[in-house]
Amino acid sequence: MKDALPTADRYHNFLFDMDGVIYINQQPIADAMEFINRLREKGRRILFLTNNSKFTRSEYREKLAGMGLSAGEGEIMTSSVATASFLEENYDLEGGTVYMIGGDGLREELLRTPLRLLEGDEGRHADYVVVGWDTELTYDKLRIGCLALCSGAVFIGTNSDATFPSPEGLWPGAGSILAALEKAAGREALVVGKPNVYMMQAALALVGGKADVTLMIGDRLETDILGGWRVGLDTCLVLTGVSRRENLYGYQPQPDLVVESLLELL
């Protein structure tokens, strides 16, 4: 782990996790807002990179705008976006069907693919089961997903984050839903989101593909820091979200930078 002295000036591109880094639920983190606006003034390239699959890119754009950050939808990559792209690149989806557990963000991206979404009990016959964060999860959704998986459906997860940071503490995340289905069906999901290489490489490509001038900033060691390290990025852990300083002891890989506030990088 390096001292936080190599400032933001050495990097041309910045990948930002969102929950726990820029805001916590609906509450913006003031130092992060100021830091990003300063980067904008310097002409740096920014990509917002979130494992949260629930919301659409349009919703994220509006949320950031409401906090004083201007961002185009092309500057926002969610695990739903990555998952839909992964499916199209790796499977023949023509004529295929999918059962989804997740929110509007995942639904919107899956509808961009050739897959036909199955609703309700029809989902037990789906060719693919795709699971993201679902705050309206029911036992019935798990039952239908489990039946499809036991019949041989391809099992895809947007991300495996066990928790989600909220102002009142940690909530169960998409990884907790995945864990229930994995246990029930006796199968492991193929997970697309951070720290997996597919999403990280796709994000890096969007900012020009130069790892040596790109910094990954996040609040989770096991997703943001590990994901950045896997594709050769310098990484910065900011202690405003999930991971704490004590979590660093014995963890590998170590982040290159650790800060309490992103303003320390200036």
Image (tube, helix red, strand yellow):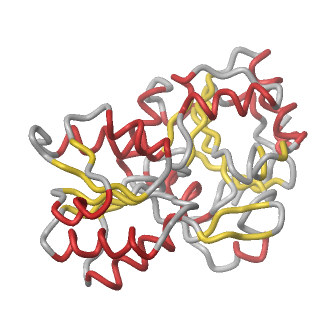
Q: Residue 142 in the image: x percent, y percent? A: 38, 73
Residue displayed at 44% across by 53% down: 193
When the figure is inspected, residue 265 is found, relative to residue 133, above or below; the finding is above
- Location of residue 68 (image quadrant): top right
Q: Dividing the picture into quarters, in which one does residue 216 lie?
A: top right
Quadrant placement of the N terminus: bottom right
Q: Determine which quarter of the picture holds residue 182.
A: bottom left
Residue 213 falls left or right of residue 33: left
Q: As rendered, which of 44 and 157 lies closer to the eye?
A: 157
Please tell me whether residue 123 is drawn above or below residue 200 in the rendered image: below
At which x and y percent is residue 20?
74, 54
Work out which residue is located at the far front of the displayed protein and give it: 121
The spot of residue 49 in percent (x, y) is: 56, 41
Residue depicted at x 15% and y 57%: 127
Q: In this view, does 150 lie above or below 158?
A: below
Q: In which quarter of the image is the C terminus?
A: top right
